Amino acid sequence: MRSSLARLTEIRRALPLAAAALLVGALLVPMWQITLTAPQYPGQELLIELYAYPRLGGDFAEVQGLNKYAGFYYPDPVFIDPNYEVAAAAIDVPEWLLGPVVFVGLALTGAFVAFAPTVRKLKAGLTAQFVGTITVFVGMFAFIQYRLYQAGHSLDPDAPLRGIEGFTPPLLGAYEVANISGFAWFGPGGYMTVVALALLATAYLARDIEATVSELPALAVALPGAVRERVASGEGGDRGQNDADSTTTDRDIGGGDHAR
């Protein structure tokens, strides 16, 4: 039986801890960014950076001036004063305050799962965490896109530019409004979140073996061959024998589930 400290080097325990660190770190940098080009700024791209809490970075003041022409405004977080001017016609997004709560909560869940006292509880925790985290982020993605739809369809009728129809800025991708072109994509925090999800997926897939992080490269190299062998064995009708061989191989690599 491995010591508690040694068990934290297992892929299924170490990666949730690394994912937790990434999720907390993502709060310190922009989650999302938008680059804009407009005739008013020839030869220059304007950048807006959005954090997981009510804060903007980059050229948000200049972009706010452009937005007023079309009657499109930054959202109002309602319960706090952000670092930008909030227009009376802005849509309300009080849930923006919950971003840090969600990220810290998921990080704490990862730490809790990593220290599970038994393998059975560890496997159950990894499954629940992976499914729950995916569900939370898919829900957040959909809700933010809905808020963007609201903002794009709540244009100020008294704006200087008339005749602009309602539009839906994409959370990820390109769009155009009048003579302004924009492109929205992940910021550093968004990439950190994607990496954290990949680590959680890897930990979930490795939930049945005791392989350590140092063995991860070898497992990754061996995976394509193992998949081809499994497919070939299925086609050959000798699946039972190959499953037994696969089980033996897994035990050789992972050492088996000795800690119960």
Image (cartoon, grey):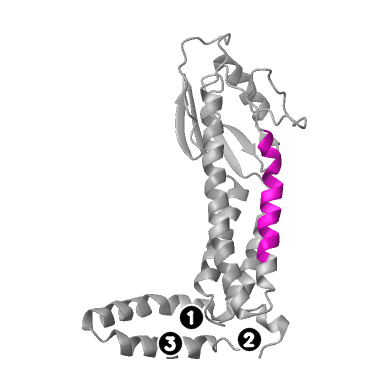
Q: Where is residue 208 drawn, in percent x and y?
A: 52, 79
Q: Name the residue beneath numbered marker 2.
A: 259
At 23% from the left edge and 84% from the top edge, which residue is drawn?
Answer: 237
At 55% from the left edge and 62% from the top edge, which residue is drawn?
Answer: 130
**Secondary structure of residue under mark 1:** helix
Q: Which segment did they paint magenta?
A: 94-110
Q: Residues within 10 Å of mark 3 (few under 14, many from 20)?
A: few
Q: Where is residue 148 drawn, in percent x and y?
A: 54, 31
The N terminus, quarter of image: bottom right
Q: Main secondary structure of the magenta part?
A: helix
At 48% from the left edge and 80% from the top edge, which residue is drawn?
Answer: 218
Among the two numbered marks 1 and 3 on one chain, the one whose residue lies closer to the N terminus:
1
- In three-dimensional space, the C-alpha distance between marks 1 and 2, rounded to whole angstroms, equals 23 Å
Q: Residues within 10 Å of mark 2 (few under 14, many from 20)?
A: some
Q: Is residue 199 visible?
A: no
The amino acid type of the residue labelled 1 equals: Ala
Among the two numbered marks 3 and 2 on one chain, the one whose residue lies closer to the N terminus:
3
Among the two numbered marks 1 and 2 on one chain, the one whose residue lies closer to the N terminus:
1
The amino acid type of the residue labelled 2 equals: Ala
Q: Where is residue 19 drawn, in percent x and y?
A: 63, 62
**Secondary structure of residue under mark 3:** helix
In the rendered view, does 226 fall on the left or right side of 204? Answer: left
Q: Name the residue beneath numbered marker 3.
A: 247
Residue 22's disc number:
none
The C terminus, quarter of image: bottom right
Q: Name the residue beneath numbered marker 1.
A: 218
At 70% from the left edge and 23% from the top edge, which residue is drawn?
Answer: 86
In the rendered view, does 248 fall on the left or right side of 206? Answer: left
Would you place residue 91 above or below residue 32 in this image? above
